Structure formats: C-alpha cells, structure tokens
Image (cartoon, helix red, strand yellow):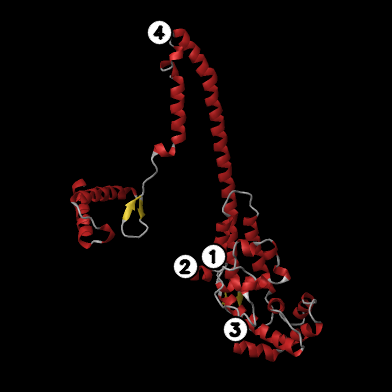
C-alpha cells in the first residue's frame, strides 16, 4: 500500500513538474517533499478528513489542532505547579549545607501546601467559573440561533405563500412595483389637475397607501382616513379614479398584470412586513456579544431587489417609520442592493437625499474599479 501510494505521489509530482503553474517543482528534493505530503494525503483519505484548498487546485488533508496548542493553559499551570513544588531543590535559602535540609524542606512543604496550594485552588475556581460562563454563553447563543433560524424559515414561508392570480413568491414583488408605478402616474396627473405640488416623499407616501389599501367600497374609506393630512379633494379624486373599472382594466393591459390592480394588498404585505420587522428587531435587541450585522445581513440576503425597493417605500410612510426611528435602515443597510437609477430622480425618488454616499452596493463596486 505504501509503495503504491509512493508511486502515485511521484506521478503527481511529475505532472506538477511537467505542466508548471503554481504546483511546479523544479528540484528533486522539493519534489520529494511534495511526494511525502501527497503520500500523507493518500493515507489519510480513508479517514475522510479531506478539505479543499482556496483555489480549488488540489485537495489537502484537514489537520486537527495539536493538543499542546489546544491545552496550553493547562500545560502552563501544570508546569508552574511542578516548579513551585520542587523549589526545595533549587532554592539556596532553604539549604543549610550542600545536602538537603529536612527541616527547611518541611517548612517549604508547609509553605507550598498552604500558600501555593491555595493559589492553585483559586486558579481552579477561576477556571471553573470561566468554563461555566463559557458554557452558559454557548447555551444562550444556541437558544438565540434556534429562534433566529426559525424566524428565517418563517420569512421564507411567508414569501412562498404570497400569491395573486397565479403570481407568487418573489415574482409578486416585481408585479407590485409595476402596479405602484401605475398608481403613481395617476396620482401625479390628478395632483397637477388639482394644482397640488407633491414632494417625492409625499408622492411615495400617497402612492404606497394606494397600493397597500387599494380602492373600493371599504378600501377607499381606509385610504381616505390614512391620507387625511393631504388635500381632501385630491385624495377623493385619487380614490375615485383608482376605483374605476375602465382604469383598472387599462392598467392591467398596459402593465401586463395577471390581476385587476388597485384592489389592495394589505392582507399580504401587512403580515410580511410585520414578521420581517420582528425578525430584525429580535437580532437588534440581543444583549449577547454577537455580530448583529452579520445575522441581519443573512436576513437581508433573503430579500430580492424588488423586495428591498418596496421595503424602502414602506419605510417612508407612517406605518413603516420605525424602520428609520430604530436605525435599522442605516445600521444594517437593509436596502443597499437597490440598483443604480432604479428610481427616476425627477419624478420618483432621489436616493441621495435619504442615504449618504457609499451606502449602496453599486457604489462599492464603482469604488473598487
């Protein structure tokens, strides 16, 4: 077996020598060393402890940490203890002659047993306390991660359960952005007719509520109540316009929607955003010494670009203002993956007024170039 492994190892080094690259070996001693490493790899493969190098060029065996490195604290304490116990043989202060003094040795033994022994007993207590604290922290982290991953799983389930007339999952958010922009066009047109000037944030507020509540016998009532701070004539006109069947059918055809728009999505989006908010809040309020950004980053990675766009629009309304009040939007960069120029700066949103330079992913990529 060893000879066969050696042959295979030497052939591996021959190939490395012939084909060059990072595995090129130009001397026989170096090739012999590489051969020994490959032999060790081949003999260790049976144990299954094989990893992969970062560049993926060849597999190397996984090596567990050596026991001296893993137990260096215990080794150090043992060495100090042995030195303290054997001080009688090296301390001149306790020698009356060249031979060992029994009386001095007994006194030193009492000293070692009474003082140094107490020190090591104290060290044992300290180490035990540290071990218990470490176990308690590990248990707390495990409990936290158990609920964290459960919240993550529920979020995925919530996304999968979103459905409107055959459009489901993350695809629905793409369609919702189309519906949002159609509603924004209606709001802008009616605002101009009513000679009402709307800022980009006011436009986003009104339009998102039109998407969220919709227009209809009951939806329009909630829409009017939620937009009571705006001009009543404008809000009434918007609610009536979005409730017209010809407008709905026209937008459905133009935007290629599988459903009639402006019927409202509060039963879907309300639950979705409440759960997403609670998941991030759960991480943010932890008192454990954990990297909260990395945990929230995993949640953010579940959000598609269009989900992040709709999350931003939600946060610009009173119902989503806690995203900003608690600092989640900036602290965890929840919408950093929104593509560049996704919003029209003139008619929709100017993101530079909401976020500082360097917030978005595309800014990092441009800086790297």
Which callout, 3 or 1, points at the residue further toward the start of the chain?
A: 3
Check disc 2 and report its element: helix, strand or loop: helix
Report the mark closest to the observer, 2 or 1: 2
Q: Which mark is residue 258?
A: 3
Query: Disc 2 designates what residue?
Result: 368
The span from disc 2 to disc 4 (Cα, nearest Å) is 76 Å
Check disc 1 and report its element: helix, strand or loop: helix
The x and y percentages for residue 224 are 78, 79
- For label 3, count other residues whose C-alpha is less than 10 Å away and answer few (under 14), some (14-19) or many (20+): few
Q: Which mark is residue 97?
A: 4
Which callout, 2 or 1, points at the residue further toward the start of the chain?
A: 1
Query: Can the viewer see residue 110?
Result: yes
Which callout, 2 or 4, points at the residue further toward the start of the chain?
A: 4
Residue 23 position (above or below residue 260): above
Query: Can the viewer see residue 268?
Result: no
Report the mark closest to the observer, 3 or 4: 4
The x and y percentages for residue 344 are 61, 81
Report the mark closest to the observer, 1 or 4: 4
Circles 3 and 4: CB atoms closer than 8 Å? no
Residue 297 position (above or below residue 230): above
Q: Residue at x 64, y 90 (%)?
A: 250
Of residues 359 and 113, the one nearer the viewer is 359
Which callout, 1 or 4, points at the residue further toward the start of the chain?
A: 4
The x and y percentages for residue 68 are 40, 36
The span from disc 3 to disc 1 (Cα, nearest Å) is 28 Å
Query: Disc 1 designates what residue?
Result: 301
Residue 214 position (above or below residue 10): below
């Amino acid at each position: 077996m060893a000879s066969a492994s050696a042959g295979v190892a030497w052939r591996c080094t021959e190939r490395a020598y012939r084909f060059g690259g990072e595995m090129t070996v130009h001397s026989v001693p170096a090739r012999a060393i590489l051969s020994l490493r490959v032999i060790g790899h081949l003999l260790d493969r049976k144990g299954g402890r094989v990893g992969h190098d970062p560049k993926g060029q060849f597999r190397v065996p996984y090596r567990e940490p050596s026991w001296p490195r893993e137990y260096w604290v215990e080794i150090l304490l043992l060495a100090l203890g042995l030195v303290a116990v054997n001080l009688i043989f090296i301390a001149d202060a306790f020698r009356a002659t060249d031979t060992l003094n029994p009386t001095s040795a007994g006194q030193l033994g009492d000293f070692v047993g009474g003082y140094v022994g107490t020190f090591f007993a104290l060290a044992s207590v300290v180490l035990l306390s540290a071990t218990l604290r470490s176990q308690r922290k590990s248990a707390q982290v495990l409990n936290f991660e158990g609920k964290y991953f459960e919240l993550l799983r529920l979020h995925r389930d919530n996304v999968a359960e979103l459905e409107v007339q055959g459009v489901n999952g993350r695809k629905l958010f793409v369609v919702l952005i189309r519906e949002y922009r159609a509603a924004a066009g209606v709001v802008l047109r009616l605002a101009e007719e009513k000679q009402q000037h709307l800022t980009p944030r006011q436009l986003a507020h009104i339009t998102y509520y039109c998407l969220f509540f919709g227009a209809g016998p009951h939806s329009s009532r909630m829409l009017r109540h939620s937009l009571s701070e705006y001009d009543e004539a404008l809000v009434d006109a918007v609610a009536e316009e979005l409730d017209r069947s010809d407008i709905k059918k026209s937008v459905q055809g133009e935007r290629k929607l599988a459903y009639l728009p402006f019927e409202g999505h509060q039963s879907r989006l309300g639950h979705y955003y409440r759960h997403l908010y609670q998941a991030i809040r759960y991480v943010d309020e932890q008192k454990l010494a954990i990297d909260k950004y990395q945990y929230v980053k995993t949640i953010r990675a579940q959000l598609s670009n269009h989900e992040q766009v709709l999350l931003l629009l939600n946060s610009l309304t009173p119902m989503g203002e806690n995203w900003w009040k608690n600092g989640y939007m900036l602290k965890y960069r929840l919408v950093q993956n929104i593509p560049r120029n996704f919003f029209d700066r003139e008619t929709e949103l100017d993101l530079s007024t909401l976020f500082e330079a360097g917030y978005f992913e595309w800014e990092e990529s441009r800086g790297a170039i």
